[in-house]
Amino acid sequence: MSISLPAPGVAGRSPVAAARPASAFRPELQGLRALAVVLVMVYHVWLGRVSGGVDVFLLLSAFFLTGAFVRKVEGGRPLALLAYWLNVFRRLLPAAVLVLLATIAASVALLPKARWDSIMEQITASLFYAQNWQLARDSVDYYAAEHATASPLQHFWSLSIQGQVFILWPLLLAAGMLLWKTLATRLPALSYRMTMGALFGLVFVLSLAYSIHATATAQEWAYFDTGARLWEFALGSLIAIFLPWLQRLPTALMVSLGWLGLAAILACGMLLQVEHEFPGYLALWPTLAAAFVIMAPNHRLGVQRVLSAPALGWLGNVSYALYLWHWPVMVFFLVESGSERISLGAGLGIMLVSLLLAWATTRIVESPMRSWQWLSAKRRRAGLSIAVLLALVLAPLGGWEHRVAAEELRAASQAPVENPGAAILDPGFGHEPSSEAVMVPLTTKLDEEWSNFGADCAGAWAPASPAIEYCQQGGNPKAEKTVVLLGDSHAQHWSGAVDAMAQKQGWRWILLTKPSCRFGGPSETRGEECGAFNAAAGRYVLETDPDAVITLGSFTALGPDQHGHTAGEQEKVVPDYEAGIRPLLSAGIPVVALRDTPRFTTPVPDCVDRFGAEAQQCSAPVSELMAGSSPLDPLVDGGTLGEGFSTMDMTDQLCPDGICRPVIGNVLVYMDQSHLTSTFARTTAAEFEKRFFAALGEKR
C-alpha cells in the first residue's frame, strides 16, 4: 500500500487533513491523561518507581501544541508567538503558584532548617521553569526510595522541561514555516507538514542518540536534561504531523495497535526496571505506546471504549493540578508522620487529599483564570497577570530569605565565647554560654561546613598520579615538618583540628582523600578506583617521606544490621589495614590510627531542628554506636606493627559522659549522620594536639 503526500494548497492546506478534523475533541486523550497521572501517583506512593506516565504527558503536550500550530499555518492564520506564550503561561501559572505558596508555608512549618536553602532555590527554579537543571546540578537521584528526604518540588522537573519546550517548539515551527515558504517556490510538492516532519525527525534522531549516550554515561544528569528528552516531544510532534496519513492504514491494524499501546502503558512500570536506565532507549516503550493510542481510529471495538469513560474524562480535566499536588502532599505526609513507607490506607488518603486539592484548584483557580476573557483580550493584561502571579511567590519567598539572613547575621556577630564547642569539656573552662546565644553553625549554613581548610597541592607536593584527585595542603609552606592526613571523608572532617595544630606548631599538613575510600591494603571489599587511590597514596607518602601520617583505622556502622547486631557490635578495624600501613612503618614513617566517629541513623541537624538540641531522641548512648573498647587496641597490644604505630581516640570529645550528643558547647557536632561540622572539629584542636603528641610519645 503506497501513500502519497499531497501537494500544498493555499498556505499549505492538506486535503488529507480535512478527512478528519484534527482539532476535533478526542475524549480518549483526556482519558489517556488521566491514566498517566494515576500511574504516576500509584508508582510514586507505593512502589517508589517510575511508571512511564510522565513520558506520556510529555508526548501528549507536544502532540497538541504541534497540531494547533500546523492547523494555524494550513488555515492561513498568523502564528502570533507572543500571544501564544502569554496565554500558555497565564493558564499554567495559577495552579503552579498556588502549590508553590503552599509548599513555602509547609516547608517553614514542617521541614528542618537544614533543608530550607535548597527549597528556596528550588522554588525559584520551579517558578521560572528551570527546576530540571537545578536538580541536575544537585545530582538528585529521582529513584531514591526515601521520599521523606526528597524535595517537595522535585516533580516540577517535568513541568520545567515542558515550559522550556513551550518556548522552543513555536520557534521551531515558525522557523519551519519560513524554510517551507523559501523552498516551496522551487519544490511546489513540498508541504508545511513535510517540512516540519523532516525537522522534527532530525530532532528525534539527534536527541535520542544523545539521550542513549548520556543515560549510559551520566544517568542522574540525563534524567533531568532537556536535551535528552526532546526526542519524546519530537515523537509527539511527528504523530501530530503525519496522523492524517497514519489513519489511512488498515483499521484492524490500528485498532489492535491502540489496545497494544494501552496494555504497554499499563505494563511499563511493572515489566521495565527503569532505575538508572531512563530516559535512553527504554523511554521508547511508554512514548510509542502512547503514540499507538493516539493513532487508533474511532471504532466501536477501539481503545476509546475504555479511555472515553466519563470518570476518566473528569480525572483528565484535573490531571494537571493532580500532578502538581500529589508529590508535595506525599512528601509532607512522610515528614510529619515519620514513616518510611506508605501503607495502603495512608496511600489512599494521600490520593484522596491530592484529588480534592486538585479539584478545588481546577474549579476555583485554574478554570476561572483560563476563561477570564478580559485577561486574554490584550497582551498587556496577560503580561500583567503573569507578573502578578510571579510576585505572589517572590514576595513571601523574599520574606523567608530575609528571616534566614537575619538569623545568620545574628550568629555571625555573636562572641566566640558563646560557642566554645569541645573546649567546654575542659575542666578549666569557666564560661557557660548564655541561654540567649545562638547555636552555630546554623543548620541553614551546613553547606559551608565541609572541612576545606587548605589549598590545592602544588609544587613538590602535587601528586603525579591521576588516581589522587583530591589533595590539599595547608599550614606553613616553608615548614620543616609535615603531617599527612590520609583517607576518606571521615579523615577529612578532622582536617580543621589538624590545620589548627599545624598552624600553632609551624608545620605543613597534607590531606589526601577519596570519598568512601578508607585507607588500607588491597581488599575485595574495595572497588577498583579505591584500590588504585590507596596504592597511589601509599606511594605518595613513601616518596614525600612526611614526619607522621594520620589515618582512620576503624569502621563504625550505621545502625543495626540484618542480624540484629548493634552499631557498636559492628565496629571493626578497616579491612586489610595492616597491609596498607606496613610499608609506611617499614620506611620509618610514624602512623597514628584514629578511631572512627559514631554514626547516627538519622541526620542530626534535622533532629535538632525538629525536636531541639536537648531532645533525648537526638542523642544516643555511646555503647549503642561504638564498641566497648577500641578495635584498634589489639593492634598496639600485639606489638607486631612496631613502635612507629600508635592510636588516637577522640570519642569522649563527641560523646561526653557516655552520651553522643548533637550539640556540645552550643556548637552543632554533626552536619549529617556521621560527618563533623568543621566548626566543631576546630574546637577540638587543643585536645587533638595533646593526644597526637601523646600518641607519638612526645610531650608538649
Image (spheres, grey):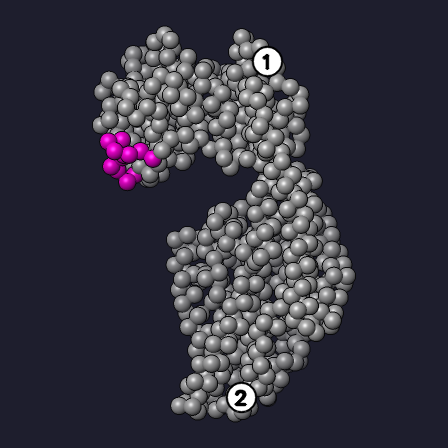
Residue 420 visible: yes
Place residue 613 in its image quadrant. top right
Name the residue beneath numbered marker 1.
431
Observer-side mark, 2 or 1, equals: 1
| Secondary structure that dominates the magenta span | loop
Quadrant location of the C terminus in the rendered image: top left
Residue 419 visible: no
Q: Residues within 10 Å of mark 1 (few under 14, many from 20)?
A: few
Task: Locate residue 10, reporting x and y percent.
Answer: 54, 91
Mark number displayed over residue 542? none
Residue for point 48% across, 65% down: 230
Residue for point 61% across, 81% down: 22
Above/below status of 679 relative to 90: above
Above/below status of 57 relative to 417: below
Does the stretch in magenta take in 428?
Answer: no
Place residue 466 in its image quadrant. top left
User: Under tag 1, what secondary structure?
Assistant: loop
Magenta extent: 456-467
Task: Locate residue 274, reporting x and y percent.
Answer: 49, 55
Q: Amino acid at mark 1?
A: His
Earlier in the chain: of badge 2 and badge 1, it is 2
Task: Locate residue 375, reporting x and y percent.
Answer: 71, 69
Residue for point 48% across, 60% down: 226
User: Under tag 2, what secondary structure?
Assistant: helix
Residue for point 59% across, 54% down: 126
Name the residue beneath numbered marker 2.
11
Does the stretch in magenta take in 461?
Answer: yes
Q: Amino acid at mark 2?
A: Ala
